[in-house]
Amino acid sequence: MCHDGAALNPFRGRKDAARMSDEDKFLFDTNGFVVVRGVFGADDLRRFHAAIDAHADRIHERKGQLRLTANRTPLSGDGVTGRKDLAGFLGWETPHREPFRDVLTHPRLLPYLHELVGPGYRLDHNPLLILQDPGSEGFEFHGGSTLDSGEWNHPLGYQFNHGKMRCNLLAFAVHLTDVKEGEGGFCVIRGSHKSNYACPAAIKRYERAVEHAHQPAIDAGDVVVFTEATTHGTLPWRGASQRRNVIYRFSPATNAYGRGCALASVARIFHPIPVSNVDRDVRSTDPRRRSLRASQVRRERVAERVSGGHDGRAGAFDTNVNFTHRSLSTFDRVSFQLTDELLAQRSVMNPPYHPRLNRTVVAEDGVRAIEAAPREKHKVDFDRAVFKQDYF
Ligand SMILES: O=C(O)CCC(=O)C(=O)O
């Protein structure tokens, strides 16, 4: 029996689940984006900023050929100050990583992920913090539904089929600072996710038809949810202080665009054993602890193969590396300090494969991971016999 449907939509018919409002559905389908107001409050914002300030030495400014705009165009700002980028925060030391990790399963954002990308959604790119100092250049308009050749840009695609919206790449722009009207920053051509013609270069450079480009006013703590199928970009920054915006991209369970995120995920970002426990376990006289540590080392080796090792080289892509409720015993879960919340966050880091293959899916409360439609044992056994591994 095929249970694709049950796996793809485990929450069908659930009345208690938080959903995107009819207003947001209309606005998203019409414009290609919505602004979700007040997701993060003053305390959250303080935590984000403290974490960023503690890692300020890792910020890179785009200069020379890394600049994102052509010289002396409306997007080039003062011509000197480049956009600044910072990443790696999901793997920062606690407590700095937590506010960034919370975005992955945030209950206010979950309805957008489940509606627009689907249960089993995955983090597709390594998330990135964008910083613009006063005078900073913007970013030429990009994304869009149509390639310059005129073909459909399906990796970014937006579709409405069988009564449902579907985004192949959905972005969250988590604004950590205010953006007033006319100050610059995120800018989008409304409705361009449905455009069938290539966007002319002069429009991408903000030289023509600028009245069609919309720069929303955004408060710190708001999140702009947009499909990458919109033509969008960044206007130069005219504000008096630094703009900070964290961008996350998500894709459906069966899609992938980025490469770095899956490679970096299991081994390094959600490392299951607190480092301080490792030595103690290796030295332990308790055979159960020693054997637990040995199995951990095996898992790390596999995970390292996936992530390409600690020098960042690309490695084999092994979909069997998937730490789930099922594959970890209660003893494992307690020993590895894998809380429900951490398991839910980790499930967002899984590589692309269909939810019917025992994919863990973030539950609608955002604090648990569930297996949508567990694969029958006789099928797994048969795959093992045929393929010599757990899944086809
Ligand atoms: O500055 C922004 O908010 C948008 C940036 C963007 O679209 C990108 O980095 O791909």
Image (spheres, rainbow, N blue to C red):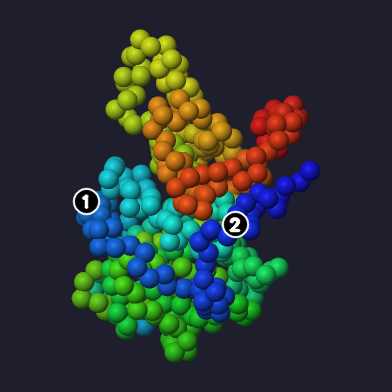
Relative to 332, residue 91 above or below: below
Q: Residue at x 60, y 54 (%)?
A: 11
Q: Is mark 1 within 8 Å of ligand 1?
A: no
Where residue 111 sits in the image (x, y, percent)? 51, 61
Which image quadrant for residue 132? bottom left
For marks 1 and 2 on the same chain, the one whose residue lies earlier in the sequence: 2
Where residue 222 sits in the image (x, y, percent)? 36, 68
Relative to 390, residue 185 above or below: below
Where residue 81 sits in the image (x, y, percent)? 26, 70
* Residue 75 falls left or right of residue 345: left
Q: Quadrant of the N terminus?
A: top right
Where residue 85 sits in the image (x, y, percent)? 33, 60
Q: Residue at x 71, y 35 (%)?
A: 376
**Residue 262 visible in the shown view:** no
**Residue 315 visible in the shown view:** yes
**Res 14 label:** 2
* Residue 165 falls left or right of residue 59: right
Amino acid identity at mark 2 = Arg
